[in-house]
Amino acid sequence: MNTQVTAFGIVCFAAIITGALHAGFQLFKIASLDAQARGLSHPRLWGLLAASGNNSAGLIMYLISRRKYPVINMSKEMIHEIESRKKRAGAGILFLALGAIGSVITIALI
């Protein structure tokens, strides 16, 4: 096996891990800010539940639970931060997708 292909595979795997962690953290922060604006108790716990889980059960549970609570106090800064974090999460998903494509190419080259 070629060392360049191996190095490319390692870089792609690192991109997958980096993208997944970054997107997950941004989802945690978005859900925490939203829970805080809606007045839910323990917003960090809600953010952790939304960001964790293999089949997104925590995110679905959060989205169903938050319907009972209207937005009480969301400042312009909080809206701006949520929009910024959405873009960052998109960048993390892009890293994840590019890493996955690169991994498939690496497997095809082996």
Image (spheres, rainbow, N blue to C red):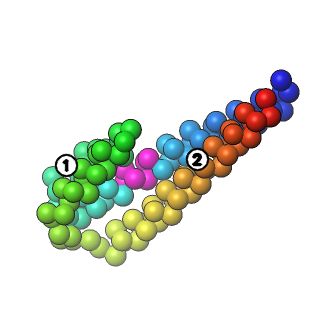
Q: What is the x, y in percent for residue 9?
A: 72, 34
Nearer to me, 72 or 97: 97
Q: Residue at x 64, y 36 (%)?
A: 13
Question: Quick check: is 13 in the magenta stretch?
Answer: no
Mark 2: few/some/many CA within 10 Å (<14, 14-19, 20+): many
Q: Is residue 47 visible?
A: no
Which callout, 1 or 2, points at the residue further toward the start of the chain? 1
* Circle on res. 96: 2
Q: Residue at x 74, y 40 (%)?
A: 105
Q: What is the x, y in percent for residue 103?
A: 68, 38
Q: Residue at x 49, y 56 (%)?
A: 89
Q: Is residue 106 visible?
A: yes
Q: Residue at x 60, y 49 (%)?
A: 97
Instruction: Give left or right: position of 5 versus 56.
Output: right
> Does the residue at mark 1 contact the one at mark 2 (Cβ under 8 Å)?
no
The quadrant of the image that shows the C terminus is top right
**Disc 2, SS:** helix
Q: Which span of residues is magenta-colored?
A: 24-29
Instruction: Give left or right: position of 57 versus 16.
Output: left
Nearer to me, 49 or 75: 49
Nearer to me, 65 or 80: 65
Q: What is the x, y in percent for residue 5?
A: 80, 33
Q: Amino acid at mark 2?
A: Leu
Q: What is the x, y in percent for residue 74?
A: 26, 71
Q: Which residue is mark 1?
A: 42
Which secondary structure dominates the residues rendered in magenta? helix
